[in-house]
Image: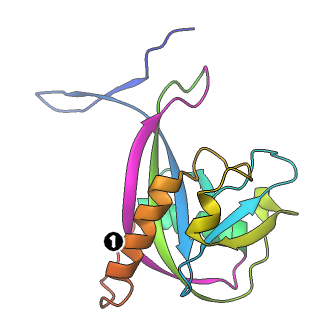
């Protein structure tokens, strides 16, 4: 198996080549008590994790992340997008050597959480940062304590700022 990522080439008189990467979107949802929402899937057995999924063709990072939020937490949840917290490249598996992961921050504004889609049957819990820093629970690789701490710090800065227009669909 080659370690080479797929390459796409632009059209035109001066074509450029770009590495093509799969994109994973993660949602960091924080409530007014500054607790972070995590799910634990009985079928995945990967520990407590953020809402996450794959970006689909034609979606913006925000629209793809919101789609995952509604698929995994139900259509009754109300969240307010605050901003992108982090982006990283990571090894996914032997066929997808490098994946781009993005982490979007949301303020929880209410609504019933009903795990759905590929998270049906999952438990969910609001976690204070102090509990996330303990080694007593298993956490998915997406639930990095340092990043979640940064997310809470950004939540404090952004939550009271006026809403800004969202990027329109591609």
* Name of the residue lying farthest toward the left: 13
Q: Residues within 10 Å of mark 1 (few under 14, many from 20)?
A: few
- The answer to whether one can see residue 62 in this image is no
Q: Which residue does the image show at 65% across and 65% down from the upper left?
A: 131
Q: Is residue 77 above or below residue 14?
A: below
Q: Which residue does the image show at 74% across and 79% down from the upper left?
A: 113
Q: In what element is the residue under mark 1?
A: loop
Residue 18 lies in the magenta-colored region: no
- Residue 141 versus residue 8: which sits nearer the camera? 141
Report whether 39 appears left or right of 120.
left
- The answer to whether one can see residue 22 in this image is yes
- Where are the magenta residues, as a range? 74-94
**x and y percentages locating residue 167 in the rendered image:** 33, 71
Q: Which residue does the image show at 39% across and 85% down from the upper left?
A: 159
Residue 80 lies in the magenta-colored region: yes
**x and y percentages locating residue 7 in the rendered image:** 36, 24
Report whether 29 appears left or right of 135.
left
- Residue 132 versus residue 72: which sits nearer the camera? 132
**x and y percentages locating residue 141 in the rendered image:** 60, 44
Image quadrant in which you'd find residue 156 = bottom left
Q: Which residue is mark 1?
A: 167
């Amino acid at each position: 198996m080659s370690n080479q990522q797929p390459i796409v080439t632009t059209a035109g008189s001066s074509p450029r080549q770009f590495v093509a990467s799969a994109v994973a979107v993660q949602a960091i949802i924080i409530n007014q008590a500054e607790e972070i929402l995590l799910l634990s899937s009985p079928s995945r057995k990967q520990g407590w994790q953020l809402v996450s999924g794959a970006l689909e063709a034609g979606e913006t990072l925000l629209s793809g992340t919101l789609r995952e939020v509604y698929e995994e937490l139900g259509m009754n949840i109300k969240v307010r997008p605050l901003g992108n917290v982090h982006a990283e490249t990571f090894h996914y598996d032997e066929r997808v050597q490098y994946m781009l992961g993005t982490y979007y921050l949301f303020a929880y504004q209410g609504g019933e959480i009903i795990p759905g889609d590929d998270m049906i049957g999952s438990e969910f819990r609001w976690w204070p940062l102090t509990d996330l820093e303990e080694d007593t629970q298993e956490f998915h690789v997406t639930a990095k304590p340092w990043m979640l701490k940064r997310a809470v710090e950004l939540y404090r800065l952004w939550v009271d700022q006026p809403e800004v227009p969202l990027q329109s669909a591609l």
